[in-house]
Image (cartoon, grey):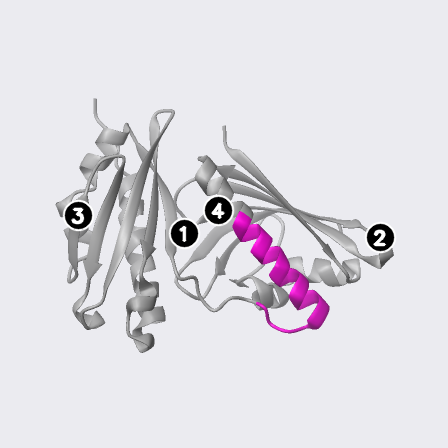
């Protein structure tokens, strides 16, 4: 059963201003990400600017009251149902709520709760000041995939051949295995700096959820950090998408 995360924030602004910040792509880009469209029944893509993105569709929109979206982060892993609601609050304020359903494990739900708390703070800041409040880039690449089969079968597929196929040109060394896998990564472009990837494996019914976190971007030379983070976000998306498409033969 997927987890549901609920986060609320009181915003001292008119309901129409808050709604526009949720449903007008130009305004969403000031506090969240660059979205191409928000039209019920139509797909959208929301780019965060650092290589991360959401791919999904607008499920329904009740202007000034409720917006429902469905998306997958990096177009892999589980699907998440997002429900924004706007309600009157005291002193002319509005209560903005977001319910996010789809996290397959408790740790991801905790991360989503922290993330939505931050995003609603940014929404509040943009609506009440008009200033851009969107973050520049995330210091961690984090994503998840759903692989067919057991934890042991999933771990077996993520070996040296898999790394070589998707991270050619880098030095990638698997330094530990077990319930989690650690990969130390360096790149000739980085001038001796190194980063670390942790993959954790979580058993689900007939599937394994693989959670990836790639840390250490602040160790790279400053002019390279964002471009390299974008490049590796693409690499990992492709690598985990390949794992998702594997069909087990028994």
Tell whether label 1 touches label 3 (CB within 8 Å).
no
Q: Residues within 10 Å of mark 4 (few under 14, many from 20)?
A: few
The local secondary structure at tag 3 comes to strand
Q: Report whether 242 appears left or right of 24.
A: left
| Front residue of this view, candidates 11 and 56 | 11
- Which residue in the protein does label 1 denote? 74
Which residue is at a point 26% across and 37% down the rendered structure image?
246
Looking at the image, the residue that sits furthest to the bottom is 223
Tell me which numbered mark, 2 or 1, is placed earlier along the sequence: 1
* Residue 121 is one of the magenta-drawn residues: yes
Mark 3 vs mark 1: in front: 3
Of mark 1 and mark 4, the one earlier in the sequence is: 1
Circle number at residue 90: 2
Cβ–Cβ under 8 Å for marks 4 and 3: no
**Residue lying at the far right of the rendered structure:** 91
Q: Could you tell me which secondary element the residue under label 1 belongs to?
A: loop
Residue 115 falls within the magenta-colored stretch: yes
Determine which residue is flagged by label 4.
111
Label located before the other in sequence (4 or 3): 4
Which residue in the protein does label 3 denote? 174
């Amino acid at each position: 059963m997927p987890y549901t995360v609920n986060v609320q924030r009181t915003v001292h602004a008119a309901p129409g201003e808050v709604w526009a910040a949720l449903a007008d792509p130009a305004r969403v880009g000031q506090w969240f990400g660059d979205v191409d469209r928000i039209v019920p029944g139509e797909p959208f893509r929301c780019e965060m600017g650092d290589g991360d993105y959401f791919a999904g569709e607008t499920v329904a929109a009740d202007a000034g009251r409720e917006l429902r979206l469905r998306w997958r982060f990096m177009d892999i892993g589980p699907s998440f149902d997002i429900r924004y609601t706007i309600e009157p609050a005291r002193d002319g304020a509005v209560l903005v709520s977001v319910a996010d359903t789809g996290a397959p494990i408790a740790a991801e739900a905790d991360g989503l709760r922290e993330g939505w708390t931050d995003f609603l703070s940014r929404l509040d800041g943009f609506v009440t000041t008009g200033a851009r409040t969107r973050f520049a880039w995330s210091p961690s690449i984090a994503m998840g995939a759903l692989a067919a089969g057991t934890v042991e079968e999933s771990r077996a597929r993520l070996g040296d051949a898999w790394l070589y196929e998707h991270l050619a040109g880098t030095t990638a060394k698997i330094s530990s295995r077990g319930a989690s896998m650690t990969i130390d990564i360096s790149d000739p472009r980085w001038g001796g700096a190194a980063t670390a990837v942790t993959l954790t494996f979580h058993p689900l019914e007939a599937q394994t959820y693989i959670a990836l976190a790639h840390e250490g971007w602040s160790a790279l030379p400053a002019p390279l950090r964002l471009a390299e983070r974008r490049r590796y976000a693409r690499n990992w998306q492709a690598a985990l998408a390949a794992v998702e498409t594997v069909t087990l033969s028994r």
